[in-house]
RNA sequence: GGGGAAGUGGCGGAACGGUAGACGCAGCCGCCUCAAAAGCGGCCGAGGUAACCCCUCGUGCGGGUUCAAAUCCCGCCUUCCCCA
């Protein structure tokens, strides 16, 4: 199946014309109603396939619709250009990361343009440009000044052979992906951003993001993982030290039969003073065996194991001595690095106690049960009534939680606390291809900020990128610096930032992309923010979208942005495009590329197919048979509109009137004019409702072509035909922008169809003179009547009762009651 | 294990409590043609029936709410996604 017109030439012509004329340029600040529509900043990985095209087509259709509905639309594009793949290319093939990245951007820019997107290219940003990343550094320093960026030791994956840090995904079965050495965990001083300071707001404000998908909000809630409970202290017997634990179940405190700590727990050195040498050696060996294990392995993959330390902890209320164990499943990085073990009322503790022969002391019984419980065959997790809990026995769990918290507070042994699963954001990467962290380390002054007027700290060229060691650390000309504060010799920080830093604020840079004095302009932000519609994959539901929310709240607190302190008002996740029922991948060899598809069918056909096959949030399947339908659509469109084009003088003369529907002289003409408006209504409503189910709109456009074809055969000179043909380019413009523009021009218009107002659906045109009245008896359809619209209830009822089939179903009896839905149905109930 | 989304013809899907299967793909029949392609017209859930009238069944399964349920509620099964 071939497109019947020269789509290649048509599409190229308009691509260039739009570019030349700046058709889609947005004003500096909006004057009328504004609409900021944004697709997630892409990583320039290389070739685009039709899955990417689907994402950009959805966003572009929305942008074009909103423009045609009269809004000032901001629709920008840029490149998330820092990151590991460029550095890996450098390691594997000796290509300079910048060269590799720039050539990928050039290719992707060409492909994104190829698919007819209406971006304002004057606002293009590239995050590896010093003009961009200097503002990363500037923002980092503002976080640093406010105590929201801090440095501390934290474990990383370390390859001892390559002497480098590995990302989690570079650790395969505990070994380095490059050299197969066993990976170690090693503590390094690293920069963190204090996102936990915003945990409560990030959680609470999810409730206000009503136009985000529920699943995304749920995922963020789970990720933040707020729990209310008590932080309390167990003294380590025979020392002055203590072990802090957090629990949401303070009511089970009397049931604690052990305390479990992480092998890296800071109390271990103190604890060693009270135990035998043999115990101490065993602890060291146990810690050593876990040293190289990742969190994932410890908590999920490995069996839960542990070792008695020989030391005891003292329960702050019962004063009972319980053994302290080191375990693999308690992590030093999470919470307090220690938990109290209550086997009777916690599944994990129950399993652990069973395995290691620890006592199981039940202190909660179901309401209504006796105080002498039978031995448990599994942990009892529900709330109940306390037993064997000193003064608290007999209380309900809920009441006991409060009473125990109060008692602990009075004793100075505990306090009510809120715990979050969310941890501070580690942004240090021991990598080259990223934003240098603008900090100088001075022996005398400590960590000192690079002054604003010395920004950007440029990424030096010709770094030794070999995969061994940190490239910047091996460049003395970069490392050696003078302290901005005392002028003495100092060392530059040789880490670069996590690339999620750049993507946490880029939507603001689009507002003033060339401003050399500020990351963004206040007026521009006041005018354009917030992003009205954000579009991107569900895989970013947590990290990117949480980091961006954190940044925006910080900006808001600094007074740099006004209005709502959420960056993205509405969020839409598009579905994947499969091919042959599988995800597209190079290894499967099932990738459908954009270039090839554009060459075979044209961009308009591709866009229409991607939109029509499923609702945009659903997974869809690419098929070459499926796109046939869209090629036919375009061919029909071209053919049906062109006779009108030859009469361009007539149309030009009637130019002011082309939006006014002519009187219809036949039912087919009436139906045709009506279908024009039905299609326009669908396009408008799918946009303003933010459902974006343009698959339904395209079905209406199919019906419109069917109606047009019917009238053309019947009355080729019909004014209704001219009207519908003239409306068509307007109607399809957001979805198939090139062919629409070409037809529009051929009809004698000198200005772009994309700057026209969309066709306003008119209810009076869509009203039907005759409708089908459905007659039901007891909810089952017994007759369909073609009747004039607007019958009164009694008229409809009389008609319904006169139907022979209805009378037969009523079997001579009068209906007990009836329901009338005007112009729809009558339901008679026997 | 917890949470979320979804199950409709041969296929993708439409129907936001009111005519189930719009529209498209595939298939079948016809027109056009020397022929093919393209195009145009028709048929296309299952069963009953001479029948396109009409009747019965039918939206994963089982209940419920309602004059009326693919749609709302409860339970189950299956699939996908996220977190463990």
Image: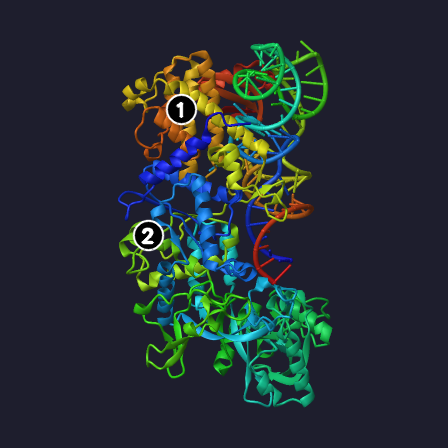
Residue labelled with disc 1: A766
Q: Is residue A541 above or below residue A380?
A: above
The chain to which mark 2 is attached is A
Work out which quarter of the rendered image holds the N terminus of chain A and state it.
top right
Work out which quarter of the rendered image holds the C terminus of chain A and state it.
top right
Q: Quadrant of residue A506?
A: bottom left
* Mark sitting earlier along the chain (1/2): 2
Residue labelled with disc 2: A511
Q: Is residue A750 above or below residue A553?
A: above
The chain to which mark 1 is attached is A
Q: Position of residue A122 (x, y in %)?
A: 34, 47
* Residue depicted at 55% across the width and 86% down the height: A241
Which is more toward the observer, A463 or A371?
A463
Q: Position of residue A96 (x, y in %)?
A: 48, 60
Which is more toward the observer, A406 or A596?
A596
Question: Secondary structure beneath disc 2?
Answer: loop
Q: Is residue A134 left or right of residue A256?
A: left
Would you say residue A615 is visible in this rendering? no
* Residue depicted at 43% across the width and 28% down the height: A679
Pointer 2: residues within 10 angstroms few (<14), some, or many (20+)?
many
Which is more toward the observer, A549 or A55?
A55
Would you say residue A52 is visible in this rendering? yes
Question: Secondary structure beneath disc 1?
Answer: helix
Pointer 1: residues within 10 angstroms few (<14), some, or many (20+)?
some
Q: Is residue A14 left or right of residue A405?
A: left
Which is more toward the observer, A42 or A95?
A95
Q: Position of residue A323 (x, y in %)?
A: 65, 82
Q: Is residue A456 left or right of residue A259?
A: left
């Amino acid at each position: 199946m071939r497109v019947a017109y020269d789509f290649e030439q048509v599409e190229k012509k308009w691509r260039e014309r739009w570019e030349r004329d700046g058709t889609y340029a947005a004003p500096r600040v909006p004057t009328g109603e504004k609409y900021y529509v944004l697709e997630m900043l892409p990583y320039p990985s290389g070739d685009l396939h039709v899955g990417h095209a689907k994402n950009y087509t959805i966003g572009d259709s929305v942008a074009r619709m909103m423009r045609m509905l009269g809004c000032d639309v901001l629709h920008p594009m840029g490149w998330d250009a820092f990151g590991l793949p460029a550095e890996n290319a450098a390691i594997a093939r000796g290509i300079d990361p910048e060269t590799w990245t720039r050539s990928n951007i050039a290719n992707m820019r060409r492909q994104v343009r190829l698919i007819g997107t209406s971006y304002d290219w004057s606002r293009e940003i590239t995050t590896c440009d010093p003009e961009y990343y200097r503002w990363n550094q500037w923002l980092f320093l503002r976080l640093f000044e406010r105590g929201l960026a801090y440095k501390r030791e934290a474990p990383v994956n370390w390859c001892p052979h390559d002497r480098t840090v590995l990302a989690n995904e570079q650790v395969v079965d505990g070994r380095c992906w490059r050299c197969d050495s066993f990976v170690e965990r090693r503590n390094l001083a690293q920069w963190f951003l204090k996102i936990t300071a915003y945990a409560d707001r990030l959680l609470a404000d999810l409730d206000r993001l009503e136009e985000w998908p529920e699943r995304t909000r749920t995922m963020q809630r789970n990720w933040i993982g707020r729990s209310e409970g008590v932080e309390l202290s167990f003294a380590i017997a025979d020392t002055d030290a203590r072990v802090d634990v957090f629990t949401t179940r303070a009511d089970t405190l009397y049931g604690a039969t052990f305390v479990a700590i992480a092998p890296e727990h800071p109390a271990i050195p103190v604890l060693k003073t009270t135990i035998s040498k043999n115990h101490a050696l065993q602890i060291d060996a146990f810690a050593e065996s876990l040293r190289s294990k990742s969190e994932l392995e410890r908590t999920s993959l490995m069996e839960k194991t542990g070792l008695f330390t020989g030391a005891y902890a003292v329960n702050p209320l019962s004063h009972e001595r319980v053994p302290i164990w080191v375990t693999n499943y308690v992590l030093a990085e999470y919470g307090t690095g220690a938990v109290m073990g209550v086997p009777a009322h916690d599944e994990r503790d129950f399993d652990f106690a069973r395995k290691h022969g620890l006592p199981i002391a039940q202190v909660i019984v179901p309401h209504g049960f006796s105080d002498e419980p039978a031995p448990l065959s599994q942990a009892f997790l529900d709330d109940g009534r306390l037993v064997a809990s000193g003064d608290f026995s007999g209380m309900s769990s809920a009441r006991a939680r409060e009473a125990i918290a109060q008692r602990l507070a009075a004793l100075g042994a505990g306090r009510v606390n809120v715990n979050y699963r969310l941890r501070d954001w580690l942004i240090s990467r021991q990598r080259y291809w990223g934003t240098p962290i603008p900090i100088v380390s001075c022996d005398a002054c400590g960590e000192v900020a690079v002054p604003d007027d010395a920004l950007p700290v440029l990424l030096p060229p010709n770094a030794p990128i070999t995969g061994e060691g940190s490239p910047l650390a091996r460049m003395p000309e970069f490392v050696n610096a003078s302290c901005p504060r005392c002028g003495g010799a100092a060392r530059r920080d040789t880490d670069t930032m996590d690339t999620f830093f750049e993507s946490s604020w880029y939507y603001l840079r689009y507002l003033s992309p060339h401003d050399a004095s500020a990351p963004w302009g206040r007026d521009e932000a006041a005018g354009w923010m917030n992003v009205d519609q954000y579009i991107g994959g569900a895989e970013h539901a947590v990290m990117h979208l949480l980091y961006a929310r954190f940044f925006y709240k910080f900006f808001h607190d600094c007074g740099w942005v006004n209005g709502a302190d959420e960056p993205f008002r509405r969020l839409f996740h598009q579905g994947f495009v499969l091919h042959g029922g599988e995800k597209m991948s190079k290894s499967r060899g099932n990738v459908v590329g954009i270039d090839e598809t554009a060459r075979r069918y044209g961009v308009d056909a591709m866009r229409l197919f991607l939109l029509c096959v499923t609702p945009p949030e659903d997974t869809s399947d690419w098929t070459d048979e499926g796109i046939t339908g869209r090629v036919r659509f375009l061919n029909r469109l071209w053919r049906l509109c062109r006779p009108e084009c030859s009469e361009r003088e007539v149309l030009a003369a009637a130019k002011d009137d082309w939006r006014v529907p002519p009187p219809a002289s036949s039912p087919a003409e009436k139906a045709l004019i009506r279908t024009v408006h039905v299609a326009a209504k669908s396009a408008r409503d799918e946009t303003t409702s933010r459902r974006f189910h343009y698959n339904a709109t395209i079905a209406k456009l199919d019906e419109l072509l069917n109606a047009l074809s019917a009238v053309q055969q019947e009355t080729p000179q019909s004014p209704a035909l001219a009207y519908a043909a003239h409306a068509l380019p307007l109607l399809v413009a957001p979805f198939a922008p090139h062919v629409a523009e070409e037809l529009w021009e051929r009809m004698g218009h000198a200005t772009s169809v994309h700057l026209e107002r969309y066709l306003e659906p008119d209810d009076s045109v869509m009203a039907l003179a005759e409708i089908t009245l459905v007659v039901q008896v007891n909810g089952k359809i017994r007759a369909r009547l073609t009747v004039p619209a607007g019958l009164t209830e009694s008229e409809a009822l009389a008609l319904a009762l006169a139907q022979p089939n209805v009378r037969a179903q009523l079997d001579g009896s009068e209906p007990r009651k009836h329901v009338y839905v005007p112009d729809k149905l009558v339901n008679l109930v026997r």
